[in-house]
Image (cartoon, rainbow, N blue to C red):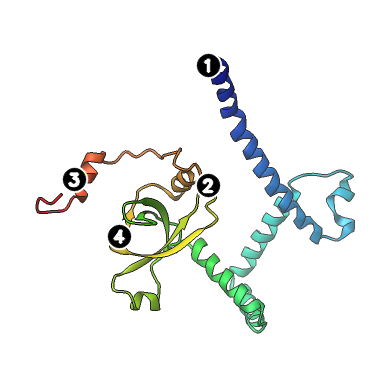
């Protein structure tokens, strides 16, 4: 039985990650294939070729995004976008949604943005308990002006689903910046701590010596 159990676990370690990967990719491809519905019915690939070709929606989506980027990268394209945004800003229900999504997208995807560039270690939900968090920014406006300490914006994801979580403004002095990448941080969160990224820095004793209080205190 122990040998049979070992063989079973070894097989699961091969097939389970592969199966989940294939399933996720299939779901993404099927979702992207829905973009083909924007084409006229007569030009649907299924009707033109007589059979379904998975992945054409992905190619169409990439082509549309790329073409849009080429257009808006020049002066004329930027003027078109400005007119379009001015039009959307006049629609009451659309204005707050569009502006919020646009601001979030610019913050996350621009190269100079601070969102999700650093993995942090903070004490949460109480002192003595530590969790991983991601820095989302340092500009907190009025909240910064009315707090005694300098604070940073952090996102504390839940596990194993990091798409939900909590937004906290944490004093900078209570934040520990980690050297691990954002990808490694996500792996550690999704795996509930089972997957710990390798670290070639100082040992535990050296780190504790660095952060120990000065003046002989313990």
Measured from the top left, where is residue 73 in percent x and y? Answer: 58, 68
Q: Residue furthest bottom?
A: 90
Would residue 7 be visible to someone looking at this image?
yes
Measured from the top left, where is residue 75 in percent x and y? Answer: 59, 74
**Disc 4: CA contacts within 10 A as few (<14), some (14-19) or many (>=20):** few
Q: Quadrant of the N terminus?
A: top right
Closer to the camera, 211 or 105? 211
* Mark 3 or mark 1, whichever is nearer to me: 1
Closer to the camera, 129 or 57? 129
* Mark 4 or mark 1, whichever is nearer to me: 1
**First in sequence: mark 2 vs mark 1:** 1
Which residue is identified by label 1? 2
**First in sequence: mark 3 vs mark 1:** 1
Which residue is identified by label 3? 209
Which residue is identified by label 4? 174
Q: How far apart are marks 3 and 2 (CA)?
A: 33 Å
Q: Distance between the residues labelled 4 and 2?
A: 25 Å
Horizontally, residue 172 falls left or right of residue 18, namely left
**First in sequence: mark 4 vs mark 1:** 1
């Amino acid at each position: 039985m122990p040998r049979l159990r070992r063989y079973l676990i070894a097989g699961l370690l091969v097939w389970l990650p592969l199966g989940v990967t294939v399933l996720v990719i299939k779901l993404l491809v099927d979702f992207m294939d829905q973009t083909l519905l924007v084409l006229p019915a007569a030009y649907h690939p299924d009707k033109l070729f007589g059979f379904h070709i998975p992945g054409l929606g992905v190619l169409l989506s990439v082509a549309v995004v790329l073409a849009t980027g080429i257009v808006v990268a020049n002066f004329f394209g930027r003027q078109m976008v400005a007119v379009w945004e001015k039009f959307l800003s006049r629609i009451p229900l659309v204005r707050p949604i569009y502006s919020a999504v646009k601001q979030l997208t610019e913050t996350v995807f621009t190269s100079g943005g601070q969102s999700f560039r650093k993995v942090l270690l903070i004490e949460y939900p109480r002192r003595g308990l530590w969790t991983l968090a991601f820095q989302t920014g340092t500009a907190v406006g009025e909240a910064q002006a009315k707090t005694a300490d300098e604070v940073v914006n952090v996102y504390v994801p839940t596990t194993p689903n990091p798409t939900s979580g909590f937004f906290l403004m944490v004093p900078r002095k209570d934040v520990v910046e980690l050297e691990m990448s954002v990808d490694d941080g996500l792996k550690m969160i999704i795996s509930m701590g089972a997957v710990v990224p390798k670290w070639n820095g100082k040992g535990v004793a050296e780190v504790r010596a660095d952060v120990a209080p000065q003046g002989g205190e313990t």
